[in-house]
Amino acid sequence: MTERTLGIIGGSGIYDLAGLQDRREVVLETPFGAPSDALITGTMAGVKMAFLPRHGRGHRLAPHELPFRANLHAMKQLGMECVVGISAVGSMREHIVPGHLVLVDQFIDRTRGRTEESTFFGDGCVAHAHFADPVWEPLRQVALAAARRAGATVHDGGTYLCMEGPHFSTRAESRLYRSWGVDVIGMTNLQEAKLAREAEIAYTTVALVTDYDCWHQTEADVDVAAVIAVLKQNADLARRVVVEIAQGLAAAPPISARGCMAHALLTAKDAVSADARRRLVALMQQYLG
């Protein structure tokens, strides 16, 4: 039977993962620097797992400071075929209430200063990943069913607008994004989705709604204290969802994104620089020759 593997990247308020058997802390280095923190490995429901707090324990890293490439490379090093990014978001829709979960299926990129953190490629090797559907649908379905079993009020599908941060939106921006049909807004998950695709890792997002951003006429504008209060309420729910995802993954057919980059490499194999080859060997050795 194929071993199931699952990486969890915990967002704001989620800095540890209880319930792991054979728990071990792993410190890794990557060609792209160090990850946000040490990774915690173990097993749950027979699934080999790795947990990484996105912002580091103690929440030390702002969204624009996150080592996205190192984080996803570390998951690849540990053999994670599937990765779930758990993220705090603001709601852009009246019916998506703080405390709800959204299993998003699309992204819009409004970041500006993170180009170097959004791809493993360039500087000696060029590739273009197919990204029309930015989350891995079989994994999203496992996470959706898991959230329902965990007792969450969960929305099936939605568009996540990834903003630059660390500031929250202006009121004009918030109203503009609503006019685009955006469902939730956050600061982190798009880069993870892009890099997971390049690393041939199946990726999906579990978005935990904490607030109404600042578009809402009757709700208070978003502030950190209000977000933290909802985060604490959501933390136990997020942990229950993770347990259910592990159990669902154990029972599901194997999920893998291997092969999705087979036709993405444009640089001729003999033209890939030695430095680029060193950076990419763990990600796509089979395509570099």
Image (spheres, rainbow, N blue to C red):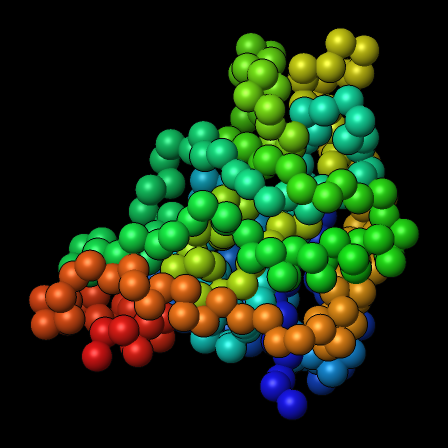
Q: Position of residue 194 (x, y in %)?
A: 44, 51
Q: Position of residue 285 (x, y in %)?
A: 30, 77
| Residue at image point 64% right, 37% down | 158
Apparent side of residue 72 relative to residue 31 in the rendered image (left or right):
right
Position of residue 72 relative to residue 151, above or below, is below
| Residue at image point 54% right, 26% down | 167
Position of residue 224 relative to residue 239, above or below, is above
Across the whole image, how many numbered discs are drawn on residues?
0
**Picture quadrant where residue 226 is located:** top right
- Say which of 238 and 160 sits in front: 160
Q: Position of residue 273 (x, y in %)?
A: 13, 66
Q: Is residue 276 among what the camera can see?
A: yes
For the N terminus, the image quarter is: bottom right
- Say which of 14 and 103 sits in front: 103
Q: Position of residue 5 (x, y in %)?
A: 61, 76
Apparent side of residue 207 relative to residue 259 in the rendered image (left or right):
right
Apparent side of residue 158 relative to residue 131 in the rendered image (left or right):
right
- Say which of 8 and 104 sits in front: 104
For the C terminus, the image quarter is: bottom left
Q: Please, which residue is most extreme toward the right here?
A: 151
Q: Please, which residue is most extreme toward the left here?
A: 271
Position of residue 232 relative to residue 8, above or below, is above
| Residue at image point 73% right, 77% down | 250
| Residue at image point 32% right, 57% down | 120
Q: Please, which residue is most extreme toward the bottom here?
A: 1
- Say which of 160 and 168 sits in front: 160
**Picture quadrant where residue 175 is located:** top right
Q: Is residue 187 among what the camera can see?
A: no
